[in-house]
Amino acid sequence: MLALLIRAAFLQLFQQDFLQKQGDIRFLRALTLEASRGRIVDRNGQLLASSSPVKSLWANPEIMQPLGISQLRDLAELLDVSPEALNRKLIASSREFVYLKRRLDPRIAQDILDMRIPGIFAETEFMRFYPSGESTAHVIGLTGSEGKGQEGIELSQDGQLTGRNGSRQVLKDLRGQIIADASRAIPPTHGKTVELALDARIQYQAHKAISSAVQAHKARSGSVIVLDAKNGELLAAANYPAFNPNNRQSAAPEDMRNRGIVDAFEAGSVMKPFAMALALEDGHATLHTMLDTRSYKIGPATVRDVAPRASLDMLGIMQKSSNVGTSKLALMSTPERFWRFYNDLGFGRKPGTGFPGESSGTLRDWKTWRQIDQATMSFGYGVSGSLLQLARAFTVFANGGLLLPVSLYPQTMEAPSRRVVSERTAALMRDLLVANSQAGGGAAAARVPGYSMGGKPGTARKLADGRYVADKHRASFIGFAPGKSPRIIVAVTVDEPSAGQYYGGAVAAPIFSRVAGDALRLLNIQPDAPGQPILPPMPQDIPADI
């Protein structure tokens, strides 16, 4: 008895901390109170991404009794696994914790808990849900299995969307049941809501238009960008093929890329207005300047038009999409000036939206140019950019000569802009682009019922193994509406249409008409050209054969 008393006193006085720690290890548990990820909403507050509470089931194999055959079979059926796989998981595990299944339907989880199998427990987690599905998938992106952003806004705004988990210390008995709180709980801090400039209504209509067009033209892919012409806000960015972020197992990695923002390409004749604007800005030409537009040589290469004319003025060069006229206008500038102008338009530099993987395109150093390089760049070869970059460059014509920054988020103050051309030059180019939608112009098929508009189609042969392939094209169209006071800029591209038509004026222009018309009506923009008819396409933007 004396020995026991001495031993007890020794343990109480000299090993109390050690024994307390050992007891805590066996019975004290820290539970994580998971924070909910923040919501993503569009400019009108429409929900685009949210987190819903779900149940995850786990087991402690060390305290579980062997399951009977019927019990094992019923549990496996509810978990949607084979009884053999479930049994292997429980027997092979030497840990006190093993997930049976994560993010279960709460009703199924409750059915399992109602079986009252000792050693099976549930915890609350959050699962990401995307109400708009495919239509906004390329912009919103998705999260991984641990709730971290992997693509799109989910990735770029992960720091804002991710909350801070709380914690709760509890005492558990040998069966793992909570018997008491051991300390005060620290509540979780939930993620913040991220509001986008995106208009989910316009996004949905753009997604429908590009998906149906890609399928109708048996194309490889297609993209649509819609910008607010007044402040550069991104109203829509739709792509096809698409994927369902609510069922990522069926999503191919190739389909998850936001092609309109991250893919750079040679755009063809949609680039011609920029070379024309530079010639007007620097005084090398006026609207009445007549240029010899017969085929001519630059070194061994020949620059030609598909339908040659002896001469054209600026309106004729625009409406007939003259490679010869555009290249001659471009060569009136020095290579350095031409490079600086394209760089000022944003080519060769990232747009700065913060979207993951956004493209900077290519704009080679002017010191490495040959004369033919500068000529071909004027009609869209030798320089590349994303569809977003092209749409942004058109803000110069729609906004009085100012290049606007593109924003994925609503602007609370006037966006900083950079003057690229004078207001006079921008107004002249806007008039030329509007005239291009009239009879005889290449943008006739892009007309929007009830509204004036301006724009330019383009058709580019695709480069493969260092050569331009004759039977692979990219059809594009970029324009603005209404033409007199632009409110939106819409850029469209369709990659490798193969159903017979491949010109930008025939393939991409009608998509512009549909998307722009929907967007103008959804934004309550008053019609400014009632009764305006739709004209048949004028495929005059055939790529040069050089």
Image (cartoon, grey):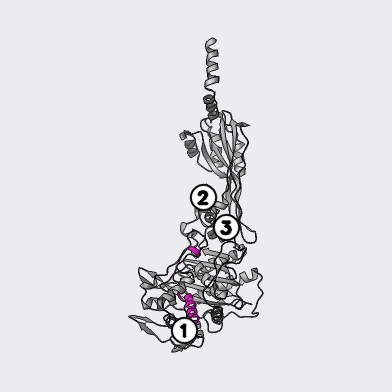
Label 1 close to label 3 by CB (< 8 Å): no
Q: Is residue 267 magenta?
A: yes
Q: Which comes sooner in the sequence, label 2 or label 1?
A: 2
Residue drawn at point x = 47 percent, y = 76 percent: 269
Q: Residues within 10 Å of mark 2 (few under 14, many from 20)?
A: few
- In this rendering, position of residue 124 left or right of residue 81: right
Specify the amino acid type for callout 3.
Gly
Answer whether residue 267 is visible to the viewer in this image.
no
Q: Nearer the viewer, mark 1 or mark 3?
A: 1
Indicate the quadrant containing the N terminus: top left, top right, bottom left or bottom right.
Answer: top right
Badge number at residue 144: 2
**Pick the front one: 488 or 174:** 488
* Residue count near mark 3 (Cα–Cα under 10 Å), binned few <14, some 14–19, many ≥20: some
* Span of residues in magenta: 261-285
Q: Which residue is mark 3?
A: 133
Q: Relative to 179, does residue 85 appear above or below in the rendering?
A: below
Q: Residues within 10 Å of mark 1 (few under 14, many from 20)?
A: some
Q: Nearer the viewer, mark 2 or mark 3?
A: 2
Q: Main secondary structure of the magenta part?
A: helix
Q: Are marks 2 and 3 in contact (CB under 8 Å)?
A: no
Under tag 2, what secondary structure?
loop
Reading the chain from its start, which is encountered first: label 1 or label 3?
3
Q: Would you name the residue on which mark 1 appears?
A: 284
Secondary structure at numbered mark 3: helix
Q: Nearer the viewer, mark 2 or mark 1?
A: 1
Query: Given the image, on which type of amino acid does mark 2 rest?
Result: Gly
Question: Is residue 178 among what the camera can see?
Answer: yes
Helix or strand or loop: what does disc 1 sit on? loop
Where residue 262 sits: x, y (%)? 47, 63
User: In the displayed structure, would residue 509 be above or below residue 291?
Assistant: above
